[in-house]
Image: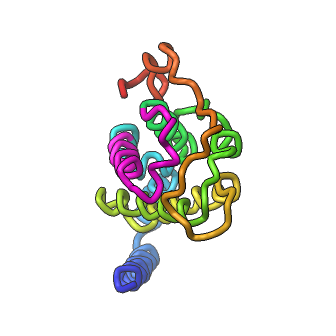
Amino acid sequence: MKSILKAGVAISLIAFFAAATLMSAARAGAAQDKMMGAAAQDKSLYERLGGEAAISAVIDDFAARVLADARINQKFAKSNPERLVFHLKEQVCAVTGGPCKYTGNSMTKTHHNMKVTEGEFNALVEDLVATLDKFNVPAKEKGEVLAALGPLKSQIVEVKGDATGTPLPADFKPAPPLTDKQKKEGPFGGKSKM
């Protein structure tokens, strides 16, 4: 809470001094300042997060954290970790304005019959927050990432309640492993190797 308050005060001070500077600057200087500010705002969340390398590092850490978390890892007992990481990278890249196209199944289809509980979804979000904090993702960008995840809850959660560590149903059918083409091209469209 203190860091949010400090950030708010800092932003207010910056805005005040920026306004005072613009008012006293010559027209050319003011126009240049305005263009520079607009350029910073034009950056996508993908770019502000650090692009491919940063997103890859965050997803690698997040996936390892999730797969080690006893509160939720049973839900991934039949999942192919390589496929999971691939599609997480692809999805985060796409939803943050990066050059990727998400090619995985819908969240509803992917999680159908996994019997994910609200508690398990919340545990996953806690793992994501811990990873974002580990990588010092700024509050604004962290908020945007979490805001993108929020609407997915209704597509993922099938069981109300706070239970965690529930088993994956025996009849759950996981997605097939990645194809050789997917492995070769990687989640960032052939620019990198996972």
Q: Quadrant of residue 30?
A: bottom left
State the image coordinates of residue 60 (x, y, percent, origin top left).
Answer: 35, 42
User: Which quadrant of the view contains residue 138?
Assistant: bottom left
* Residue at 43% in and 46% down: 47
Q: Is residue 20 visible?
A: no
Residue 104 is covered by the magenta coloring = no
Q: Is residue 38 above or below residue 181?
A: below
Q: Residue at x 64, y 40 (%)?
A: 110
Compared with 111, 5 (above or below) is below
Task: Name the spot of residue 161 as percent of width and height, x first.
Answer: 63, 69
Q: Tell which of 141 and 70 is nearer to you.
A: 70
* Magenta-colored stretch includes residue 63: yes
Instruction: Say if 127 sits above or below 84 in the image.
Output: below
Magenta extent = 56-81
Left or right position of 51 against 163: left
Viewer-side residue, 167 vs 57:
167
Q: Nearer the viewer, residue 48 or 175?
A: 175
Give the position of the N terminus as an image quadrant. Answer: bottom left
Counting the numbered discs, the total is 0
Up the image or down, 49 lies above or below 98; here it is: below
